[in-house]
Image (cartoon, rainbow, N blue to C red):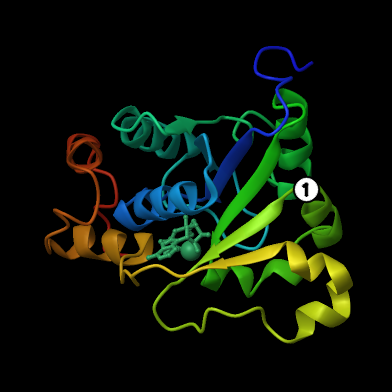
Amino acid sequence: MGASDGGRPGRRIGVLGGTFDPIHHAHLFTAEVAASAFRLERVLLVPARRSPLKGRAAVPARERVAMSRLAAAENPLLEMSTVEVDRPPPSYMADTLGLLGQRFEGADLYLILGIDALQDFLEWREPERVLDQCRLIVVSRPGYELAVPPPFAARLGARTGRILMQPMPELGISSTDIRRRIGTGEPVRYLLPQGVERYIRERRLYNKAEP
Ligand code: ATP
Ligand code: MG
């Protein structure tokens, strides 16, 4: 049994990792679509302290956690998880899943990714160990074909079967574009939760024009 949540087999827990710099409506819609399609009982929002393949985030982890917490508070499906920001960087998903596997002992973990993020998956640390600990749910994003890239089968073999494609309406929303818009004074309302926008305005985050 895990410390607090473990035990019951057959539970399905979604894990949506990201920089969340800031969290936006495409992240939240993705969580909803994946949960509905795969009967996930909850989706953990897991902001990365520092993702190994990305540079520094535009704002510190504590701000990204606060914004993700505001977004999670509006939806009982969602739970903010500090499993990555609580440990020293970089944030390797293989380790994160190990920790979540202890917390949700006996549960099936589903890591949710946009198809853009899947393109880098073979460069992650120990992709095999990631797939041994979870299934991937991969959703559509504009500009990418929703398919497993050809090199995956050669590297991952039968584990490729643990990568599940979930079509969804494509949403051309990105944190990069939101940061840029805030820097130039263009509107961001309806791209992200109102409470998150309010938080950004109050703390004057992303005011520099650089994305
Ligand atoms: P950035 O522009 O800073 O990279 P982002 O909008 O891509 O930000 P991330 O925090 O990098 O957001 O993404 C977290 C996860 O959410 C990734 O798996 C990514 O593919 C997915 N995601 C983000 N935006 C979308 C979108 N518009 N449609 C589908 N998936 C998305
Ligand atoms: Mg991204």
**Residue 90 in sight:** yes
Identity of the residue drawn at 54% across and 31% down: 81
Quarter of the image for residue 141 reads bottom left
Identity of the residue drawn at 36% across and 64% down: 176
Tell me: 29 left or right of 14: left
Tell me: 73 left or right of 191: right
What residue is shown with label 1? 94
Q: Quadrant of the C terminus?
A: bottom left
Q: Is residue 172 above or below residue 179?
A: below
Mark 1 residue's CB less than 8 Å from ligand 1:
no
Task: Return the residue nearer the eye: 67 or 183.
Answer: 67
Task: Return the residue nearer the eye: 69 or 108.
Answer: 108
Q: Position of residue 6 (x, y in %)?
A: 71, 20
Three-letter code for the amino acid on which mark 1 is drawn: Ala
Identity of the residue drawn at 66% across and 71% down: 120
Q: Given the current orientation, which residue lies at the most extreme top position? A: 4
SS label for mark 1: helix
Give the number of callouts.
Answer: 1
